[in-house]
Amino acid sequence: MQASFMVVANWKMNGCRDRVTNLSHELITRCGFLNQPKIVLCPPYIYLERVQETLASSKISLGAQDLSCENNGAFTGNISGEMLVDVGVQYVIIGHSERRLNNAETNDIILKKLSIAQFQGMTSIFCIGENIVEKQLGNTFKAIDHQLKPVITLIKNDPSIKCIVAYEPVWSIGTGCSASVQDVERVNKYIKQIFNDLNYPIKIIYGGSVNEMNIEQFVAIKSLDGVIVGNASLSADKLINICMRVEKQTMNTLADIV
């Protein structure tokens, strides 16, 4: 675990104007004094600007759930990286399994998105993870190797890219069944070695049924730099509880080190 632990709230296609505003405001009010964690809120596109207005005077950052693989043009319904930056977005989720599955996103599409995020100066939260069949067949690393190709390609061309890898095993997302500490540590070690070979200091966060009851086990993983929270982030009390538990545990860990 690094000194700055991240909590990324992915609200997916949930909420309404009042709900996201109230949730953001309550988070600032109750967690604005915390030294840890680094909080990133990823609301639906339509509420990005409203949430940013709420976050303007806080330490909490704004993230987007996706971006177009095109810079601009006749692409009805798409949102460009330039538009995201224009409303204050600093982080963008790319390659989420729901996008790969539901929107048939290929490595070529994902590479374009990573390139645009890099060009616009955003930090990519790049999602990878095996499905249940791949896990049962022992093909976790094979799946990860395939999914990592776009970001490895970019890093080889330009090591200045700002990227965080999010290990989100597909079988754990929204199921209530999170990966074990041993599984996360094993995968993290594998990913770290790949990026060590590239001389790139990668940060890794975990996503998949993270909640206020299991957050402490993830904070305790030394190779982990944060978490992505889905369902639990839609509740102000749960998300705040997660953040406060991160604050308490990270401060205790840093005190022990000193």
Image (cartoon, rainbow, N blue to C red):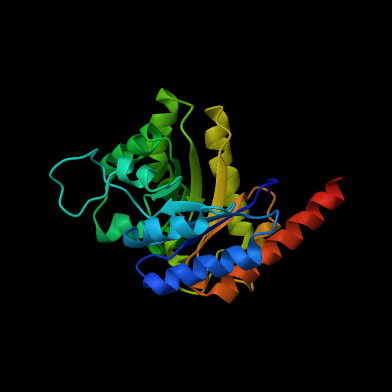
In-image side of 88 versus 233 (left or right): left
Q: Quadrant of residue 240?
A: bottom right
**Looking at the image, which is closer to me, 204 or 244?**
244
Q: Position of residue 222 (x, y in %)?
A: 70, 50
**Looking at the image, which is closer to me, 120 or 228?**
120
In-image side of 239 versus 43 (left or right): right
Q: Position of residue 89 (x, y in %)?
A: 42, 47
**Looking at the image, which is closer to me, 207 or 12?**
12
100 relative to 108, above or below: below
In-image side of 32 versus 191 (left or right): right
Report the quarter where the C terminus lies. Answer: top right
- Residue 139 is at least partly visible in this image: no
Q: Quadrant of residue 124?
A: top left
**Looking at the image, which is closer to me, 249 or 22?**
22
45 relative to 3, above or below: below
**Residue shown at the point (54%, 56%) measured from the top left:** 206
**Residue shown at the point (48%, 36%) measured from the top left:** 162
158 relative to 11, above or below: above
Q: Position of residue 180 (x, y in %)?
A: 60, 64
Q: Position of residue 185 (x, y in %)?
A: 62, 52
- Residue 91 is at least partly visible in this image: yes
Residue lying at the far top in this picture: please name it: 157
Residue lying at the far left in this picture: please name it: 74
